[in-house]
């Protein structure tokens, strides 16, 4: 899912994504907040003030690709000085409200498999004009204009905006259909995105120690100096691990509610531990864990072995542990509980309240933002039963009446001074930051406000003296209620053709968009718009693996993904060239002048059943010769005797393969070691520095080259095809992410930003290839991806 706010503003330099979303979705007045109205009734969305330029409001835009399922043109407001009748239903209380509406259905994906295929709806109300071309049953693309904001009770340039979905989508979107997350099992794996989270049960031990003194991966209970003891956490705690723009930040959360009150989780003041290079250095961390484990097993296998060897884990397995807190990709090794995942945390505000905790200990389970953790205060509230518009949810009323919350003076009303907590007071208390924070995370089920057939059922209570005594000076009489009902009928629009029941689930639009902007999982439709020329069957075959790789190696932000796909479009021919193809042509000494693609080299190695060149009939001189195109322009040199290739056979055996065209024996060896397919002690490091290698005399080499017998594993297994590229850009070329992060997160529209974009693209190209091959085309492909993703 690629999603953005309904209003799009330029992003300020160094502005976080969350701050940008907040700026694009500025609330418009206290009466239009989610999920409560001034009368402590349900309010299914929020009022947003459009950005205004020269007194003209910006257009509202589609938040994601979708299909328009409903439109209603606005009733024109009488122009200029023409008096508007006070009885006009859209001029309720003497203030005009526009009634243009657009509803868009969004079908997309947030992960892999059927349960990660989701459907939700975005609702744009109070439009003054609907954009040209926006019509029911027509597709619409993200960022396309939906309409021009109108008036809400006389305030210009505003919309009411909702995000809603059916009951059968709740578990798909939020990971569960009721209650809180279970703490006796890890979170979902079909959708994993955003921050990682870890439940630390009561009694979890935190071992004192400096941030620079990480305990060994082989140690479950570090030995402490005399007089020191581990700290035991009181009650459940939750670690939030965020990787963002190179940094790793750990925040500790706990329940701050008083005994007897409903749980209210919040970060512990001062309990934040940040490593500015923690994400950039993940590859080093994983490699260090392998070295530690190897050393620990060497000690255990000494002359008098007294301990059982610890299980061997590859760097890729450890990388998954560090990245996700658990194994997400089934192709990888799972790190057993007998090995530790130590993280340095703060559990209080004082400098002394720090230490090391094992996030891979028994009883500790990992989750992600895709689980909508209840310790971030995500709460499911089903208030569909009574069907009226009053919020009678005991959960929400409990939050607002919580004695831990500072009181707000009760508004004075004639004839009432009984000291009771009224609905009017509850509405005011709901604005207190601590309560507002919880309300923003409430996922609520209640009837829509916009179904004309439900008006009396939802609002009839306004005529009841008992039920209105808390919110109105007096109940509405027949005339007053008639005007109110006519007003609601003028705004109502809900009908069966929308495809969503009139009672459905709602989520705070800002928090929905913030959360799913961290998803980064491309849907088939979104990907098809980027790799337009790639056959659909090829895109469909490879997309899950591309998504999994981008997620694993943190290339799944809109900016990083744009460069990842732009570079990959050139390297892999937009997925159509996952194995390097040769050419046939004229041989002139050590030169090959290519004239046409050699069809034999393009035959998938899965079809061959072996790597191309295994048979003597498959000998291909292209790879061992200096390469020129048909116009005499040099392409590249011979692959023989470079980058660890031992002679002509390796030149062909270790040709480019995969999304990033992994090439040469040394790179294959390193990836094989990374995945645990090859032991590092089975070959000599830097064997290409052996003097007999340099002399091209392999029979006399003392160094032992790495033995990789099945290089076709890169192309025959789609996961490896992409994972090898992710590994290369993270482990072999760690400057890639740093280079990308120097780019701007907006579409380049000025000479200065285009120049910066070109410089960054060239830097990324050099970080990957050590040169600037096809740098212009890489920039073009990256820009094309940005148009879709940013």
Image (cartoon, grey):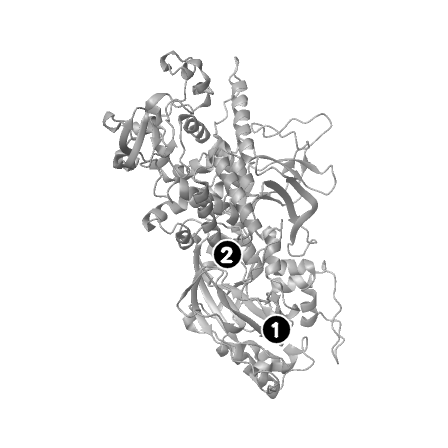
- Image coordinates for residue 500, horizontal then vertical, percent: 44, 67
- What residue sits 68% from the left and 75% below the top? 470
Can you say whether 706 is above or below 70 in the image?
A: above
The residue at which mark 1 appears reads as: 156
Lateral position of residue 109 relative to residue 368, left or right: left
- Image coordinates for residue 379, horizontal then vertical, percent: 57, 57
CA neighbours of label 1 inside 10 A, class few (<14), some (14 to 19), many (20+) = many
First of labels 2, 1 by sequence position? 2
- Which quarter of the picture shows residue 260? bottom right
- What residue sits 35% from the left and 33% below the top? 713
- Which quarter of the picture shows residue 250? top right
Lateral position of residue 501 relative to residue 438, left or right: left
| Helix, strand or loop at mark 1 | strand
Residue 334 seen in the figure: no
| Helix, strand or loop at mark 2 | loop
User: In front here: 752 or 530?
Assistant: 752
CA neighbours of label 2 inside 10 A, class few (<14), some (14 to 19), many (20+) = many
The label shown at residue 439 is none
- Which quarter of the picture shows residue 108? bottom left
Lateral position of residue 577 relative to residue 91, left or right: left
Residue 243 seen in the figure: yes
- Of the residues tagged 2 and 1, which is closer to the observer? 1
The label shown at residue 3 is 2
How many numbered marks are there? 2
- Image coordinates for residue 164, horizontal then vertical, percent: 50, 64
Q: CA distance from mark 2 to mark 1?
A: 26 Å
Can you say whether 761 is above or below 213 in the image?
A: below
């Amino acid at each position: 899912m690629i999603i953005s706010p309904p209003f799009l503003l330029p992003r300020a330099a160094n502005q976080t994504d969350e701050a940008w979303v907040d700026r694009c979705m500025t609330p418009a007045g206290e009466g239009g907040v989610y999920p409560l109205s001034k009368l402590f009734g349900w309010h299914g969305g929020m009022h947003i003030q459009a950005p205004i330029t020269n007194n003209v409001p910006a257009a509202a835009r589609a938040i994601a690709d979708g299909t328009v399922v409903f439109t209603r043109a606005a009733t024109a407001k009488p122009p200029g000085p023409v008096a508007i009748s006070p009885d006009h239903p859209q001029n309720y209380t003497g203030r005009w409200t526009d009634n243009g509406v657009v509803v868009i259905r969004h079908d997309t994906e947030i992960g892999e498999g059927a349960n990660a295929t989701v459907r939700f709806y975005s609702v744009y109300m109070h439009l003054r004009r609907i954009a040209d071309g926006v019509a029911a049953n027509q597709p619409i693309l993200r960022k396309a204009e939906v309409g021009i904001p109108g008036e809400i009770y006389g305030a210009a340039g505003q919309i009411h905006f909702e995000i809603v979905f059916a009951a059968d989508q709740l578990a798909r979107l939020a990971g569960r259909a009721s209650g809180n997350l279970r703490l006796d099992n890890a979170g979902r794996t079909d959708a994993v995105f955003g921050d990682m989270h870890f439940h630390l049960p009561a009694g979890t031990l935190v071992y004192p120690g400096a941030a620079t003194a990480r305990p060994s991966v082989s140690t479950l209970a570090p030995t402490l100096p005399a007089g020191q003891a581990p700290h035991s956490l009181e009650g459940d705690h939750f670690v939030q691990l965020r990787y963002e723009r190179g940094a790793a930040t750990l925040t500790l959360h706990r329940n701050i509610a008083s005994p007897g009150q409903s749980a209210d989780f919040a970060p512990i003041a001062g309990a934040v531990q940040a490593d500015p290079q923690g994400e950039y250095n993940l590859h080093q961390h994983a490699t260090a864990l392998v070295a530690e484990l190897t050393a620990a097993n060497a000690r255990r296998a000494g002359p008098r072995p007294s301990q059982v060897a610890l299980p061997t884990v590859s760097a890729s397995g450890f990388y998954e542990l560090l990245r996700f807190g658990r194994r997400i990709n089934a192709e990888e090794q799972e790190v057993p509980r007998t090995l530790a995942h130590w993280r340095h945390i703060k559990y209080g505000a004082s400098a002394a309240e720090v230490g090391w905790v094992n996030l891979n200990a028994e009883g500790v389970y990992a989750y992600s933002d895709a689980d909508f953790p209840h310790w971030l205060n995500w709460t499911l509230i089903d208030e569909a039963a009574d069907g009226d518009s009053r919020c009678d949810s005991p959960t929400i009323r409990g939050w607002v009446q919580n004695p831990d919350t500072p009181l707000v003076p009760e508004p004075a009303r004639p004839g009432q001074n009984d000291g009771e907590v009224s609905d009017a007071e509850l509405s005011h208390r709901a604005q207190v930051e601590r309560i507002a924070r919880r309300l923003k995370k409430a996922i609520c089920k209640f009837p829509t406000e916009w179904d004309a057939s439900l008006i009396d059922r939802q609002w009839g209570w306004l005529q009841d003296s008992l039920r209105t005594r808390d919110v109105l000076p007096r109940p509405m009489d027949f005339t007053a209620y008639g005007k109110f009902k006519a007003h609601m009928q003028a705004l109502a629009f809900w009908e069966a053709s929308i495809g969503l029941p009139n009672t459905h689930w709602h989520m705070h639009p800002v928090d929905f968009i913030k959360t799913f902007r961290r998803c980064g999982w491309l849907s088939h439709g979104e990907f098809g718009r980027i790799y337009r020329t790639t056959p659909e069957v090829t895109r469909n075959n490879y997309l899950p693996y591309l998504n999994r790789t981008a997620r694993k190696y943190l290339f799944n932000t809109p900016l990083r993904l744009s460069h990842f796909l732009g570079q990959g479009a050139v390297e892999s021919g937009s997925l159509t060239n996952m194995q390097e193809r040769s050419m046939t042509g004229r041989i002139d000494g050590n030169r090959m002048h290519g004239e046409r693609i050699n069809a034999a080299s393009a035959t998938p190695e899965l079809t061959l059943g072996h790597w191309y060149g295994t048979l003597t009939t498959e000998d291909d001189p292209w790879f061992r010769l200096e390469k020129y195109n048909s116009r005499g322009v040099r392409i590249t040199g011979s692959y023989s005797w470079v980058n660890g290739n031992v002679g002509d056979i390796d030149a062909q055996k270790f040709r480019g393969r995969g999304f990033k065209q992994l090439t040469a024996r040394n790179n294959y060896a390193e990836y094989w070691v990374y995945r645990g397919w090859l032991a590092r002690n089975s070959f000599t490091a830097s064997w290409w520095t052996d003097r007999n290698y340099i002399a091209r005399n392999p029979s006399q080499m003392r160094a032992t080259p790495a033995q990789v017998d099945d290089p076709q594993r890169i192309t025959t297994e789609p996961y490896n095809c992409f994972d090898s590229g992710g590994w290369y850009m993270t482990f072999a070329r760690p400057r890639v992410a740093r280079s990308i992060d120097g780019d701007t997160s907006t579409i380049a529209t000025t000479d200065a930003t285009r120049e910066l974009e070109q410089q960054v693209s060239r830097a990324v190209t050099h970080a990957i290839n050590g040169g600037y091959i096809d740098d212009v085309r890489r920039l073009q492909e990256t820009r094309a991806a940005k148009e879709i993703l940013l």
